[in-house]
Amino acid sequence: MTATATRVLVLNSGSSSLKYQLIDMADGERLASGLVERIGEGEVADHGDALKIVGEELALGGFGLDDPKLAAIGHRAVHGGIRFTEPTLIDDEVVAEMEKLVPLAPLHNPANITGIKVARELRPDLPQVAVFDTAFHATIPEAAARYAIDTETADKLSVRRYGFHGTSHAYVSRATAELLGKAPEDVNVIVLHLGNGASASAVAGGRCVDTSMGLTPLEGLVMGTRSGDLDPAVIFHLARVGGMSVDEIDTLLNKKSGLVGLCGDNDMREITRRIGEGDEAARLAFDVYVHRLRKYIGAYYAVLGKVDALAFTAGVGENAAAVREAAVAGLEELGIAVDRDRNAVRGPDARLVSAEYSRVAVAVVPTDEELEIATQTYALVGAADSET
């Protein structure tokens, strides 16, 4: 990496989409961003075509894939298993190991790998880095990561809690410490990433010690279309009594449950609108969502012992004041309270919404997963360059 190469292209490859951002790490400026959709459904035949389109769009802005200031490409990768616990320079061996992890994330890892292969073909000379969603949670102790099932079976099939949304939790926990004017190692934070997918984490001194998602992103909080925590015997009941197949149950729990299963909507804005009109199903969905959220706040308070901040992030966390207020209502004895006026204010910047008397800071911290991927990529590439 040359001294003038300060730009990182961040790629997020989905099964039928390719998101990108070009970030200059010299000042954090977003130079370009975009989304290529409907890959394989028409004019965009495959991810190779999609990346060529990205190159063309970048070129229109005076950049391009051959930009001499391009230091590296950072790839979002969903599942790193126990093999990949930090950002990783990609080579043939890494790709092969990622392919072995496909059974753990069959909906995501194949697309991530495809994007990586295409990018390496187009720029084989450029350092490329995989940043894994699971990596930030690799510091979780065994007591939190283990499920209480037969260890031989668990180890053979790689069954344990991995956690997801790691790049978001890493960024938000660090940004929360900065908001408080403290170093990450001096702050304990409960991070609530509330989007269509939702997860919580307990972060002690910059290290994750527990998280709500598990082997897959299904466990934990109530989400837009996912059930979250569930008695495992419900699955047996659906199969034995309901006659449902494994695939039907999978679809039910991942795509037809959560908020949409409870009230038919997975958009919190629509749900709160319906509540205002007296809709009982919407009210129940909201209450179930908040009840689960409060349980995790309490649980992670106990895990951490001492909490400096509660940070809300992602679409719902950043924008739904009603969810934030309801989630902490009645937690004054734990030192957690929001100021209604502060909480009602919307804006793009990280901010405190806690009451003056609250011992625990309550913060709204917009997440920036692309910047986190770019930051980790640039740091790794710079470190590798200095060793050569």
Image (tube, rainbow, N blue to C red):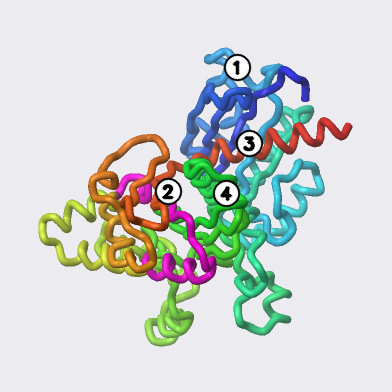
The reply to whether residue 195 is visible in this rendering is: no
Q: In this view, does 318 lie above or below 228?
A: above
What residue sits right under mark 4 in the picture?
170
Contact, mark 2 vs mark 4 (Cβ under 8 Å): no
- Tell me which amino acid carries mark 2: Thr
- Where is residue 298 drawn, in percent x and y? 42, 69
Q: Residue at x 46, y 71 (%)?
A: 299
Q: Distance between the residues labelled 4 and 3?
A: 11 Å
Residue 296, quarter of the rendered image: bottom left
- Where is residue 17 drawn, in percent x and y? 51, 39
315 lies left or right of 130: left
Q: How far apart are marks 1 and 2 (CA)?
A: 31 Å
Q: How far apart are marks 2 and 4 (CA)?
A: 12 Å
Q: Magenta span covers which residues?
A: 293-320
* Front residue of 13 and 174: 174
- Where is residue 114 drawn, in percent x and y? 65, 43
What residue sits right under mark 2 in the picture?
313
- Among the two numbered marks 1 and 4 on one chain, the one whose residue lies closer to the N terminus: 1
Determine the secondary structure under disc 1: loop
126 lies left or right of 37: right
**Mark linked to residue 375:** 3
Determine the secondary structure under disc 4: helix
Q: In this view, does 43 lie above or below 264?
A: above
Q: How far apart are marks 1 and 4 (CA)?
A: 29 Å
Q: Distance between the residues labelled 3 and 2?
A: 19 Å
- Tell me which amino acid carries mark 4: Ala
- Among the two numbered marks 1 and 3 on one chain, the one whose residue lies closer to the N terminus: 1
The residue most toward the right is: 388
Q: How far apart are marks 1 and 3 (CA)?
A: 20 Å
- Among the two numbered marks 4 and 3 on one chain, the one whose residue lies closer to the N terminus: 4
Q: Count numbered badges in the picture.
A: 4
What residue sits right under mark 1 in the picture?
63
